[in-house]
C-alpha cells in the first residue's frame, strides 16, 4: 500500500486504522557521530556505514535476534469443509466486527494478505487494519494479525508476531537521522504503521518480512498532519525479518533490519515545496515485499516497492535472510549508485514519474516465466490487479501486448481483478494487493486479496468493510491462435471449497451475466445479460457464436470483431439467494485490453 506524506491520513480514514505510539521514553543507545562524505565499509546486515556515509561516522548498531514472546491466547482449530456444503457466512460482518468477536471473523478484516502452507495449515498474515479500528483493542500480539485454514474457506484467528514496535526500528531510524544531520525523534512522538508482510517457508521455518512505516516529517520529526507540514516529505519505511516454527503461538525470533526506503537525491534532498508536489524524495519505498526462491538458480530474492519510482529486486542470503550486498546509508547521489546497493529496478508503471501508481509486487514462477503481479491505483475503490512476465528474474518484464514494464512504458495488461458488480449485489471494489500461491496436493493456483464494499452498500462506513477474497486462477490463452501462450486471470467468483468438477458441454447453454472488465478508474464494471444458446449462438452482451473444448476447459466466444478464448470452471454463485454452484468463465485476448468475466445464472 502507498506510503505518502498526505495520503496516510486518507488511508487511515479509509481503513479505519491509525498508527500507534510507543512508550514515552527518551532516546537511548543511539550513536551520534557526524555524517561525512567518504566511503564506509558496510555489511550485508546494514550494521556499518557504506557508500554515501562518511568514514568519520559511527557504525549502525548491531541488532541482536530477539524473541517476540508468546501469545496469552490459544489458537482455535478451523472448521473443514466437506467439499459439498456451500459457505453461508455473511460478507457484511459489521455486526461482529468487535475485537472480542475475532474468533468469529473468518475472512473478515483482511488487508494485504500473504498466505503460505506450513505444517498442515494455510497461514495468512496481513496489515494492521480492521473495521472501526477494532485491532487497536488488541493488546497482545496484535500487529500483523493472522489466520489459519485447512481448506481456504474456514479460517480461525492466530496472533501476529508483535505486541509493540521492535526496538530496532526506533534506534535505526534515529541513527540514520543523526547521519543526515537531523534531530532524534523521541519514542513518544513516533507514529508507526504496520503494513503488508510476506510469509514463506524457508529452511523449515516460516519466515516473515514485515513493514513498519514512520509517519513523521523528516525535517522536524513532527507527526504527519496538514497543520504540521514543514516543507519536507515524511520519514522512511523499514522492512524487517522474523521467523518461527510455531506461528499459532505468536512467538517469533525477530532478526530486525533488512532494508529501508532509500533515495537517489542524497541525504539532503528531502525538501517538499508544497503538498501538491509529487516529486518524491525516496526512489524506493520499502514496503509491500514479496519473496521468491528462483527455481533456475536457487537464489533468494526480495522484491518490494510502492508508488515512488518502482520495484526493487534485492538478493537475499538464504540462511540469514539478509541482503547479500552491503547496503550502507540509504541515500546516493544518483539512481545508478543507489540501485547498485539497494536493488536493481525491475519495473515501474511510468519511467517519467517519481510517483507512479503501482505497488504490492507478487512474483511466482511457472513454466519458464516469472509472473509479476501488481496493484494499480488507490486502495479504497480503484485498486485493480495487473500481471507481467519475464524469462529472467531481473527482467525485462512484458505485458500481454508486448509493452515493457521494466522500462516503464505505460499501463500493462491483462487485468486480473477490477471493481465489479453482478446483479443482485452491491459488488466489490478495492480488489487488489494480492498474494499468489498453490493449493497443497493439487498444485492449483490461487489469488487472495481484500475486497471492499462500495459506498452504495449503505450503512456506516461500508468502504471500510474489508473481506478476504480467495479465488482460483485460470490460465487463459493470449489469443485463439496461441492456445499454449497462457496468462493468469482470477475467476469472477470466490472459492467456495466445493469439490472440483469438470465442466461439460451440456452445462453451458442458458442465461449468463457477462462483465467487460475494463479499466475504468474508480468505477465498478457492471454485468449485462448474455445468452449461450443450445444451437451454438450468442445473443445479448455478445452477438455471434460459441464453441467448447472440454478437454482443455476452453470456451471460445466469437463475435464479428473478436474471438476470445476463456477458461471455464465450476464455482459458487455468491450473489444468488440461496448460494448455489454454477459455471463461470474468465479470459482475455492480447489486443483486447479488457478481461471477460461471466457466470451462468440459469
Image (cartoon, rainbow, N blue to C red):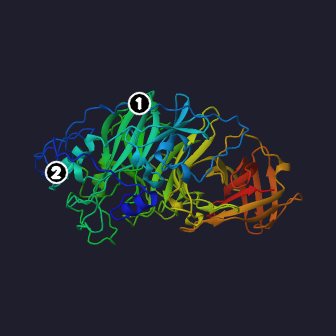
Screen quadrant of the N terminus: bottom left
Q: Secondary structure at mark 2?
A: helix
Classify mark 2: residues with Cα within 10 Å, few (<14), some (14-19) or many (20+): many
Residue that badge 2 annotates: 179
The location of residue 23, given as percent across then percent down, is 24, 45
Residue 397 appears in the rendering: yes
Who is closer to the viewer here, 80 or 47?
Answer: 80
Where is the C terminus found, in terms of image quarters? bottom right
- Looking at the image, which is closer to me, 51 or 599? 599
Mark 2 touches mark 1? (CB < 8 Å): no
Q: Is disc 1 placed on a helix, strand or loop?
A: strand
Image location of residue 236, percent across then percent down: 29, 54
Residue bearing mark 1: 244
Depth check: give the residue in front, 510 or 262: 510
Give coordinates of residue 127: x percent, y percent: 43, 48
Can residue 449 be seen from the camera position used here? no
- Mark identifier at residue 489: none
Horizontally, residue 257 falls left or right of residue 473, namely left
Q: Would residue 100 appear left or right of 549 to someone viewing this image?
A: left
User: Nearer the N terminus, badge 2 or badge 1?
Assistant: 2
Q: Residue furthest right?
A: 535
Identified at 26% across, 41% down, the residue is 168
Amino acid at each position: 500500500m502507498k506510503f505518502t506524506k498526505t495520503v496516510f491520513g486518507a488511508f487511515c480514514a479509509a481503513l479505519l486504522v491509525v498508527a500507534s505510539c510507543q512508550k514515552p521514553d527518551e532516546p537511548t543507545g543511539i550513536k551520534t557521530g557526524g555524517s561525512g562524505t567518504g566511503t564506509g565499509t558496510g555489511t550485508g546486515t546494514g550494521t556499518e556505514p557504506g557508500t554515501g556515509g562518511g568514514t568519520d561516522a559511527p557504525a549502525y548498531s548491531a541488532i541482536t535476534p530477539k524473541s517476540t514472546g508468546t501469545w496469552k491466547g490459544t489458537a482455535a482449530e478451523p472448521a473443514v469443509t466437506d467439499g459439498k456444503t456451500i459457505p453461508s457466512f455473511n460478507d457484511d460482518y459489521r455486526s461482529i466486527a468487535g475485537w472480542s468477536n475475532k474468533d468469529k471473523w473468518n475472512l473478515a478484516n483482511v488487508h494485504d494478505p500473504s498466505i503460505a502452507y506450513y505444517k498442515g495449515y494455510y497461514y495468512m498474515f496481513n496489515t494492521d487494519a480492521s473495521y472501526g479500528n477494532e485491532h487497536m483493542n488488541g493488546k497482545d500480539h496484535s500487529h500483523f494479525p493472522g489466520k489459519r485454514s485447512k481448506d481456504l474457506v474456514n479460517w480461525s484467528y492466530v496472533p501476529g508476531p508483535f505486541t509493540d514496535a521492535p526496538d530496532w526500528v526506533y534506534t535505526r531510524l534515529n541513527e540514520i537521522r543523526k547521519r543526515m544531520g537531523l534531530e532524534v525523534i523521541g519514542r513518544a512522538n513516533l507514529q508507526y504503521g504496520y503494513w503488508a508482510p510476506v510469509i514463506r517457508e524457508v529452511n523449515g521455518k516460516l519466515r516473515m518480512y514485515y513493514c513498519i512505516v514512520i509517519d513523521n516529517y523528516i525535517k522536524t520529526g513532527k507527526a504527519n498532519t496538514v497543520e504540521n507540514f514543514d516543507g519536507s516529505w515524511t520519514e522512511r519505511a523499514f522492512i524487517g525479518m522474523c521467523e518461527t516454527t510455531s506461528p499459532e503461538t505468536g512467538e517469533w525470533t525477530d532478526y530486525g533490519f533488512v532494508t529501508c526506503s532509500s533515495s537517489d537525491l542524497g541525504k539532503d534532498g528531502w525538501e517538499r515545496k508544497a503538498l501538491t508536489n509529487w516529486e518524491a524524495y525516496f526512489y524506493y519505498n520499502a514496503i509491500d515485499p514479496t519473496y521468491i526462491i528462483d527455481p533456475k538458480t536457487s537464489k533468494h530474492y526480495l522484491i518490494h516497492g510502492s508508488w515512488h519510482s518502482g520495484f526493487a529486486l534485492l538478493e537475499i542470503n538464504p540462511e540469514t535472510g539478509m541482503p547479500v550486498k552491503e547496503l550502507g546509508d540509504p541515500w546516493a547521489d544518483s539512481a545508478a549508485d543507489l540501485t547498485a546497493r539497494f536493488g536493481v529496478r525491475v519495473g515501474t508503471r511510468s519511467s517519467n514519474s517519481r510517483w507512479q501508481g503501482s505497488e504490492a509486487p507478487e512474483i511466482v514462477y511457472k513454466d519458464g516465466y516469472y509472473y509479476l503481479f501488481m496493484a494499480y491505483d488507490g486502495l479504497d475503490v480503484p485498486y485493480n490487479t495487473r500481471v507481467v512476465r519475464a524469462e529472467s528474474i531481473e527482467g525485462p518484464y512484458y505485458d500481454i501486448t508486448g509493452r515493457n514494464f521494466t522500462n516503464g512504458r505505460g499501463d500493462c495488461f491483462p487485468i486480473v481483478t477490477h471493481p465489479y458488480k453482478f446483479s443482485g449485489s452491491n459488488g466489490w471494489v478495492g480488489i487488489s494487493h494480492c498474494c499468489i500461491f498453490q493449493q497443497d496436493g493439487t498444485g492449483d493456483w490461487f489469488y487472495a486479496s481484500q475486497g471492499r464494499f462500495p459506498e452504495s452498500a449503505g450503512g456506516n462506513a461500508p468502504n471500510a468493510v474489508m473481506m478476504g477474497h480467495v479465488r482460483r486462477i485460470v490460465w487463459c490463452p493470449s489469443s485463439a491462435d496461441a492456445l499454449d501462450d497462457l496468462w493468469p486471470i482470477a475467476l469472477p467468483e470466490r472459492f467456495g471449497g466445493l469439490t472440483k468438477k469438470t465442466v461439460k458441454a451440456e452445462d453451458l447453454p442458458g442465461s449468463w451475466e457477462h462483465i467487460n472488465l475494463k479499466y475504468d478508474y474508480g468505477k465498478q464494471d457492471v454485468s449485462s445479460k448474455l445468452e449461450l444458446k443450445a444451437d451454438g449462438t450468442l445473443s445479448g452482451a455478445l452477438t455471434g457464436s460459441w464453441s467448447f473444448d472440454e478437454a482443455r476447459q476452453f470456451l471460445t466466444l466469437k463475435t464479428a470483431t473478436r474471438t476470445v478464448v476463456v477458461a471455464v470452471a465450476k464455482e459458487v454463485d455468491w450473489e444468488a439467494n440461496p448460494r448455489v454452484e454454477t459455471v463461470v468463465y474468465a479470459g482475455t485476448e492480447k489486443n483486447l485490453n479488457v478481461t471477460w468475466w461471466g457466470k451462468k445464472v440459469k
